[in-house]
Amino acid sequence: MSFDSLGLSADLLRAVADQGYTIPTPIQAKVIPVVLDARDVMAGAQTGTGKTAGFALPLLQRLMTGHAPQGRRPIRALILTPTRELAAQVGESVRTYGKYLPLSSAIVFGGVSINPQISLLRRGIDILVATPGRLLDHASQRNVDLRNVEILVLDEADRMLDMGFLPDIKRVLALLPPRRQNLLFSATFPPDIVALANRLLTSPVHIEVAAPNATADGIEQLVYFAEKSEKRALLSWLIGSNDWRQVLVFTRTKHGANRLASQLEQDGFSTAAIHGNKSQAARTRALADFKQGAVRVLVATDVAARGIDISELPHVVNYEMPDVAEHYVHRIGRTGRAGHEGVAVSLVSRDERSSLKGIERLLGRQLPQSAVDRSRLVNPPRSPDPRPQSTARDGGSAANAGRNFRPDHVRTDGGRPPAQGERREHRGDERRGEREHRPHQGGSHPPAAHRGDGNRERQDHGRRHGKSRAARRRNGAARTAAPR
């Protein structure tokens, strides 16, 4: 089967050919004809199977063949995604496939200024790709009118529910017309997704190209058992000894992502972190550097699991196992995309073995286990980092940083640590130097160290020389008793 046989227009086929595609993926071959027939769809598709084109192509054709209202362009198609990265990815696909069509689109998500989005929405657009929170912000300010939406797409619906967006989705649905086409795509089908589909869809066509919660066939999955204290050295050893050049590493927490990224930098690997506390500009820059090879390791939380689309990403590592078994499917779905092969490695500590069991129950099989000689982790092998210079934190080249790797508890200066008194004296010299060079104003006496000394008269409450009556008596008695 080719794209020519799916009933797409010549302009869409031209755009598809520009991307080098000739044969549709299984999900595209099944979804596109159903969407063109204006049927509701409930589709189960793994990440990396081409589902974005599966709904974007027929959506564009339906808008071209349908009746377009007169006047300013109303929003006729709404695509909701759970994360900013996925919204940007879907929006780019819509622009790519619709570049020969007279349709306009926009992407709105949080983390960036709302004003440019307002200007774009006021000009009128046909297709809106949005995250639920920012869409409701625009709705509350009356920047969007959703009463003319003809097609609604919920992409990665299970992730939206995982992130707590169900109340927001219900509020968005209340703003839409009752008659519309609904398309729901999900990689997993927990009970809450089934309940949402039953409320949202009307006589939907159920489409699945693989067993529910399945992973791509081209992904080699391996498990390494390691204590938490060993994971960092094991990860560095795996990257260096296997010469992995592009690695996506998942942690559970934002703080853990930052800490691991810093540690991998110390080990000589160019690394960036991406998570919800990063600004959108920082997230976009880190992702772009990773795609271009300027960054070798990208450490991410699950917020990035649905928005990283790299067709040939070779390696994914679960540095910490996910709390929800379904998230494992989405994490490793970043590799083995579009028919390519990939490797997914999980580092499992003693307290994470129950999470591993849950994942294996979800997949219906036991994951293969691998082992490494612990003695090789003391000084793991390193392959030179492609960067010519390291960051300022390294103080040397990245390649040298990798070759000179030592665990945190091993000293590399060849001598004893400075004594506590020596460190204290050094710090005191710095503070003393600052005081000696601090300019003072007014009078011949330098200011006292006490930061409240500028108000000494008020603090003394009228007492001469700042001394209490008892102190003055003691001083007077001492002078009287002193020998003359």
Image (cartoon, rainbow, N blue to C red):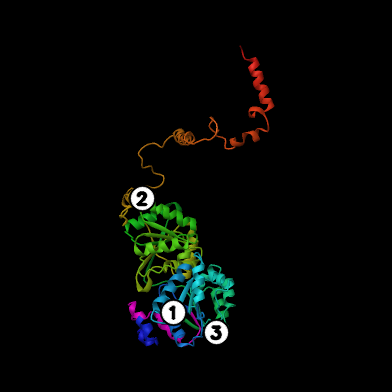
Q: Nearer the viewer, residue 319 or 288?
A: 288
- The mark lying in front, picked from 3 and 1, is 1
For the residues labelled 3 and 2, the Cα–Cα distance comes to 60 Å
Q: Is residue 253 above or below residue 396?
A: below
Q: Which residues are magenta?
A: 15-42
Q: Is residue 17 magenta?
A: yes
Q: Is residue 20 magenta?
A: yes
Q: Amino acid at mark 3?
A: Thr
Q: Secondary structure at mark 3?
A: loop
Q: Is residue 146 left or right of residue 366?
A: right
- CB-based contact (under 8 Å), mark 1 and mark 2: no
Residue 363 seen in this snapshot: no
Q: Secondary structure at mark 2?
A: helix
Q: Nearer the viewer, residue 100 or 395?
A: 100
Category of crowding for the residue at label 2, using alpha-carbon neighbours closer than 10 angstroms: few (below 14), some (14–19), many (at least 20): few
Q: Earlier in the sequence, mark 3 or mark 2?
A: 3
- The mark lying in front, picked from 1 and 2, is 1
Q: Earlier in the sequence, mark 1 or mark 2?
A: 1
Q: Secondary structure at mark 1?
A: helix
Q: Which residue is mark 1?
A: 56
Q: Earlier in the sequence, mark 3 or mark 1?
A: 1
Q: Quadrant of the N terminus?
A: bottom left
